[in-house]
Image (cartoon, rainbow, N blue to C red):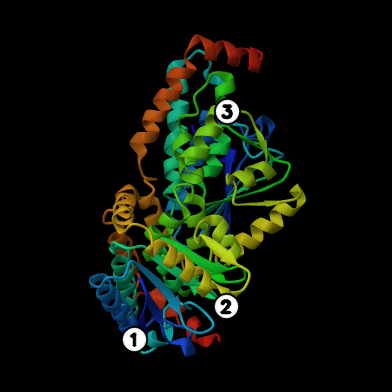
Amino acid sequence: MIRVIQDGPVAEVWLARPEKRNALTPEMLASLCTAVAQVGAGNASAILLAGEGAAFCAGFDLSLCKDHPDGSVMRALLSGLADAIAALREQHRPVVIAAHGAAIAGGCALLGAGDFVVTNDEAKLGYPVVRLGVSPAVSAPGLRLRVGSGGGAAARELLLNPRLISGLRATELGLANQSVPLAQDVIGVARDAARSLAEKPAGAIAATRALLAQLDMLGDSPWRALRASLALTGGDEERRMLPAAWRTP
Amino acid sequence: MTQPSLATLDVQGRIATLTLNRPEARNALSLDLLAALHARADDLAARDDVSVVVLTGAGKSFCAGMDLRAVLGNHDLALRLLTSLGDLTVKLRALPQVLVASVNGAAIGGGCGLTTVCDFAVTHADSKMGFPEVDLGVCPAVVAPWLVRRLGPGKARAVLLQGGLMSGAQAHTLGLVTSVVPTSDALAGAVDELTAGLAQGGLGALRATKALLNELDGSGDSDLVRRAAAISAQVLSTPDAQARLRAKLGV
C-alpha cells in the first residue's frame, strides 16, 4: 500500500490505496516509515510524498477500530502516524508533499512533515476529529510549524473546530505553500518543486534544513502531543462517539 | 467583597456565556469586576458538563479596558489591579472549555487583551479594538505575551508599539479576531453557529487538545504575567503616565 518510485534525483513515495482514498492503516504507516528509511539510505536529493487516486489521504481507516473498542487499533494508528512524521522530518533532504483533493485528519497531519506542500483550491483539509471523541493533539506540533509563529490562532481554529477548510484557505494560513486551480495539476507542480529542490547544492540544503529544525525547537513536543492523543483511546467518550465514523457514509 | 452581579454566568446545555456586566462603565475592569470574573472562572473550571464558553460584554461595549481612575496615584492598588488581570488571563486560558470572545463593541487595552486569551474571537466590522496604552504613556505588558501567541512576534510588536485603535474589519485582516460579520446584529447568529459546531466535539477530546496547545505555546506561564504586571504598574507610576492619564480622564 506504499510504493516507491525513483524519478531521477527525486524519490517518490506514494500512498497506494486509492480505493479507500488512501485511508491509513497501521501496516501502511509502518511501510511508510520503512520506505522513508530506505529512501534515506539511498542517493535521492529530494522526497516527494503523494497519494494515488482522487485524494491525497482521507485520514485513518477508522473501520479497523470497529472491532477493537479497547482502543488498541487507534493507539497503533496514532503511534504509527507520529513515527511516520518523525521519519520524514529526520531526513536530510527536503520533503515535498502533493496534497490534492483531500488531506484530512491523519492525512492532514502528514503535511506537518513537509518542507513544501502543494494543494488545489478546492481541496478539503483539516482535523475534524474532536466530534469522534478523538484528540488531534498528535497533529499540533507539525501544524504549528506549518502555520508559523503567528499561527497560534490558526492552530486553535483548525484543531478545536471540527470543520474542513479549502486548499486556498490552507495556503493563506501557511498549512500549504501553493494552491493550484485543478487537483490533477498538483502532482506536476509538486514534481517541479521537488526537482528544483533536488538540483540545489545538497550541502547547503542539508545545513539549512538542520538549522531550521533547530529554530523550530520541537524538542520532545511531538511525543508529548502523541501521549495527549493516546490518553483518550479506548475511553468512554471515544467508545460513544467513534462509531459515528462508520455509521455515516 | 465580590459582587457576582458584575460578571454573570449563564449555562445552556454545553454552552456557557460569561458576561462582563458593568455596562454603565463600558465594562471597564475594576478590582471588583476582576474579582467577579475570577469567581466565575473558578466556577467554570469545576464544570465538566460545559464544553464552550462565550465571553462577552453587557451593553454596547465589550470592555473599555482597565479602570485606572480608582488607582491613579496609588502604585500598590495599580499593581493589585494589573496582577489580578494577569492572573485572570492565565486562569481563563487554562479553563477546560473552548473560549469564544463575542466582541460586541469596543474592546480596548486590557479588554482587548481578554479577547486574545480566548481560542476564538468574533466581532463585527464596526467594533473598535486595539491597544492604545503607549499613547497614554502606559505599557501594555500583561497583554503582550497573549498578543504574541495570537499574532506572532512581528505583528504583535507593531500593534503594541503603534498604539491606537482599529475597526473590527481591520482586526480580522490582522488576525486579532478569527472571524468578522458585517454588522452588529449579525454577531449573535455567527457566534451561535460557531459554538454549535464546537459543542459537537467530545468534551474529553476538546479538553485534551486545548491543554496540549496551551502547553506548546507556554500559556501556563503565570510568572511571566506577574512580571509583566509589575512592569506595567511601574510605568504607570511614572510622572509622564500619571500626567497623561489625568488629562485623558479629566481628573
Asked if one can make out residue A189 in the rendered structure from this viewpoint, the answer is yes
Q: Amino acid at mark 2?
A: Gln
- SS class, disc 1: loop
Q: Chain of mark 1?
A: A
Name the quadrant of the C terminus of chain B. Answer: top right
Q: Amino acid at mark 3?
A: Gln
**Residue name at image x 39 percent, y 55 percent:** B211
Q: Nearer the viewer, residue A198 or B210?
A: A198
**Does B159 sit above or below residue B47?**
above
Return the x and y of residue B149 as percentages of the image width and height.
46, 44
Q: Amino acid at mark 1?
A: His
Q: Are marks 3 and 2 in contact (CB under 8 Å)?
A: no
Q: Quarter-wise, where is residue A71 in the image?
A: bottom left
Horizontal arrangement in the rendering, residue A43 relative to residue B25 (left or right): left
**Does A18 sit above or below residue B22?**
below
Q: CA distance from mark 3 to mark 2?
A: 46 Å
Q: Nearer the viewer, residue B122 or A155?
A: A155
Residue under pointer 2:
A184
Return the x and y of residue B58 as percentages of the image width and height.
67, 42
Residue under pointer 3:
B162
Q: CA distance from mark 2 to mark 1?
A: 37 Å
Q: Chain of mark 3?
A: B
Which one is closest to the eye, mark 2 or mark 1? 2
Which one is closest to the eye, mark 3 or mark 2? 2
Residue under pointer 1:
A68
Q: Are marks 1 and 3 in contact (CB under 8 Å)?
A: no
**Does A196 sit above or below residue B122?**
below
Whether callout 2 and callout 1 share a subunit is answered yes
